């Protein structure tokens, strides 16, 4: 991966940020940031977040309404049962093992079709055994409407047969007649992954690869039906039920706000009374909204919902009436709460690390022993472009390179700016993860952009263009560069659909790792003082590091320096390389001088559970 000539010292303009209602200094107040060097616009909501246990990146109903277009609807009880069926199916399926291989013999199209049919048959069998072989309510209603099961059917015998077909078990029907069941169960799995990014870590890739192949023209023609269904989102879900007014209600912002138990900027824990008061206020608003909109809309038939028929050759749409229930309203509000909690929990460690950088490091004058200056261990960087033939279709190129050690040469000032800008970009990415998830889903299951199976240097990968994800990322990068108020350090290249980031699945997986490795670092820094209450640990820290502050500075300086040094395979100063460097740093933490103290604090690792 190419790297630019190390940038020189950047001149920063000192900006005095306006502070409203500034409280008199006291010993109980958190330390104020010493250095404000960037023109960053702050809203009144963010200013007041340091004095409230509730924090949110959504501050008004307009932002929330736009956000709801990318928030999946929480799974219902019967959908959760079908999710268990899907996960069990994916656990026993060997689809990618049989399909993503470089066999010269055999028909790959046949292997793809056999693998899809095998997965569908396994899912059918498990659903029947688990007595989950009935369609979810609205899908079943759609099938009834499609088969003309109403009393107005002219042919009584035909109506009776179709009604019987709708009610009979999945196992007794032809696989093509179960298309709605397969579309729903696969959509449930995709929706659950967006709702809970930490789940299905060992099966989601298999699911998307199977659906990716099913979207191809040859597979769809051989199957005779489609496995694809659009994700069920809160915005369209409410619109179909005539509940658009709920998304215009200002109370919805307060009813879905995320309540934290500590200040995301300082790490200080809030008192139980403060948190309880916020929770009660949020609960009251939620109950008020559910009661009001249930009384107004529940039990009423809403205008027919147009649904494209994926099973027939014609492109005509069908419609069926929807009954609004209290559960629908409750699920939508809870779905927004879930999404807000996910965004804020992932955003908090990034903001905390950004705050620690600003509080403990002077961007112009490095502290002795804790300088962020970098010197490349490999001399001049290679000028090979990442878009050149750095890899062949099924093997490595002799011009590829990996290796360890720093690949960037930065002064302390330049490295400070490089880290600051990278963390700001990560903040923007975490705020928009739901949108990126939806775009990644669309890119992976695109019918216009196929994939190529190539050896990228990290095994066989499906290399596929990602136009939707790329458009969103370029927008986020542009917004970050404008907010920085200073020259951008490093490359602005966003790798997508190439050797470094083969497809949208790899992209989204890499960026979901950011909170996983930043949170343990931030938590450790916040808990050092509590850890030192143990006299034995305190004595150990005194003997090894001199004092608590030196321990904190050692950890922070090491991460801000070597977590952004361009190291690791495909590392560098590009947008993807910044994350690769941090990922590489986590694999070397066991060799650090502070590792023993890190383990004493309860540290278990950066990756979490794959289940």
Image (cartoon, grey):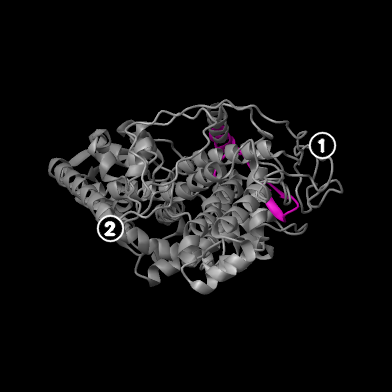
Q: Where is residue 3 drawn, in percent x and y?
A: 76, 37
Q: Earlier in the sequence, mark 1 or mark 2?
A: 2
The front one of 449 and 352 is 352
The answer to whether residue 157 is seen in the rendering is no
Pointer 2 residue: 272
Q: Which residues are magenta?
A: 445-472
* Residue labelled with disc 1: 383
**Residue 387 position within the rendered picture, expressed as x and y whole percent measured from the top left:** 75, 37
Outermost bottom residue: 536
Image quarter (top left, top right, bottom left or bottom right) of the N terminus: top right
Residue 244, image quadrant? top left
Image check: 588 left or right of 338?
right
Q: Is residue 355 left or right of residue 43?
A: right
> Which residue is rendered at x = 70% and y = 42% of the image?
498
Is residue 237 within the magenta segment?
Answer: no
Residue 573 visible to an observer of this rendering: yes
Report the Cα–Cα distance between label 1 and label 2.
Answer: 56 Å
Whether residue 454 appears in magenta in the rendering, the answer is: yes
Please tell me in which quadrant of the rendered image residue 379 appears: top right
Report the front residue among 45 and 74.
45
Q: Nearer the viewer, mark 1 or mark 2?
A: 2
Tag 1, which secondary structure? loop
At horizontal 44% and vertical 45% (from top left) the residue drawn is: 31
Q: Residues within 10 Å of mark 1 (few under 14, many from 20)?
A: few
Q: Mark 2 Cα within 10 Å, few/some/many (few <14, many 20+)?
A: few
Question: Where is 253 relative to 544, above or below?
Answer: above
- Residue 261 at what x, y percent from top left? 35, 54
Viewer-proximal residue among 13 and 60: 13
In the depicted structure, whether residue 42 falls above or below residue 115: above
Determine whether the residue tagged by mark 2 lies in a helix, strand or loop. Answer: helix
Residue at the extreme right = 398
Q: Position of residue 122 (x, y in %)?
A: 49, 66
């Amino acid at each position: 991966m190419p790297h630019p000539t190390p940038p020189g010292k950047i001149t920063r303009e000192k900006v005095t940020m306006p502070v409203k209602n500034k409280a008199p200094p006291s010993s109980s107040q958190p330390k104020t940031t010493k250095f404000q060097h960037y023109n960053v616009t702050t809203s009144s909501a963010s200013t007041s977040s340091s004095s409230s246990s509730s924090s949110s990146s959504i501050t008004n109903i307009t932002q929330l309404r736009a956000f709801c277009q990318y928030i999946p609807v929480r799974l219902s009880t019967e959908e959760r049962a079908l999710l268990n069926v899907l996960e069990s199916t994916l656990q026993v399926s060997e689809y990618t093992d049989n399909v993503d291989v470089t066999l010269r013999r055999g028909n790959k199209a046949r292997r793809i079709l056999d693998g899809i049919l095998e997965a569908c048959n396994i899912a059918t069998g498990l659903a029947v055994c688990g007595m989950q072989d009935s369609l979810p309510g609205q899908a079943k209603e759609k099938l009834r409407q499609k088969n003309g099961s109403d009393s107005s059917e002219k042919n009584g015998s035909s109506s009776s047969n179709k009604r019987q077909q709708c009610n009979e078990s999945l196992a007794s029907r032809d696989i093509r007649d179960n298309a709605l069941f397969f579309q729903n169960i696969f959509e449930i799995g995709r929706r659950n992954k967006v709702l809970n990014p930490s789940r299905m870590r060992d099966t989601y890739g298999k699911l998307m690869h199977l659906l990716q192949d099913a979207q191809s023209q040859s597979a769809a023609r051989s199957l005779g039906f489609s496995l694809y269904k659009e994700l069920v989102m809160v915005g369209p879900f409410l619109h179909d039920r005539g509940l658009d007014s709920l998304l215009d209600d200002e109370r919805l912002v307060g009813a879905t706000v995320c309540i934290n138990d500590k200040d995301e900027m300082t790490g200080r824990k809030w008192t139980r009374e403060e948190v309880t008061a916020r929770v009660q206020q949020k609960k009251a608003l939620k109950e008020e909204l559910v009661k009001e909109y249930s009384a107004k809309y529940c039990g009423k038939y809403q205008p027919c919902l147009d649904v494209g028929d994926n099973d027939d050759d014609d492109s005509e749409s069908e419609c069926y009436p929807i009954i609004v229930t209290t559960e629908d309203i409750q699920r939508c509000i809870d779905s927004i709460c879930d999404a807000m909690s996910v965004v804020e929990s992932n955003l908090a460690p990034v903001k905390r690390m950004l705050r620690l950088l600003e509080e403990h490091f002077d961007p112009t004058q490095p502290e002795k022993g804790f300088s962020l200056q970098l010197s490349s261990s490999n001399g001049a960087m290679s000028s090979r472009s990442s878009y050149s033939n750095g890899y062949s279709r099924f093997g490595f190129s002799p011009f590829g390179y990996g290796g360890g050690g720093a690949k960037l040469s930065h002064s302390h000032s330049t490295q400070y700016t490089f880290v600051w800008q990278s963390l700001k970009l990560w903040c923007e990415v975490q705020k928009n993860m739901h949108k990126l998830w939806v775009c990644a889903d669309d890119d992976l299951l695109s019918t216009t952009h196929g994939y190529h199976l190539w050896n990228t240097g990290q095994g066989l990968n499906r290399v596929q263009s990602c136009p939707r994800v790329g458009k969103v990322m370029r927008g986020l990068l542009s917004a970050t560069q404008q907010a920085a108020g200073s020259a951008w350090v490093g490359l602005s290249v966003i790798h997508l659909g190439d050797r470094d980031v083969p497809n949208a699945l790899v992209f989204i997986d890499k960026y979901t790792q950011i909170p996983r490795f930043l949170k343990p670092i931030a938590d450790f820094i916040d808990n050092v003082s509590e850890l030192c209450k143990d006299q034995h640990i305190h004595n150990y820290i005194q003997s090894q590091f001199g004092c608590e502050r030196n321990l904190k500075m050692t950890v922070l300086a090491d991460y801000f320096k070597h977590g952004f040094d361009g190291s690791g395979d495909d590392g560098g100063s590009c947008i993807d390389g910044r994350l690769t460097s941090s990922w590489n740093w986590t694999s070397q933490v066991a060799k650090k001088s502070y590792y023993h103290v890190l383990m004493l604090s309860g540290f278990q690792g950066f990756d979490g559970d794959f289940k």
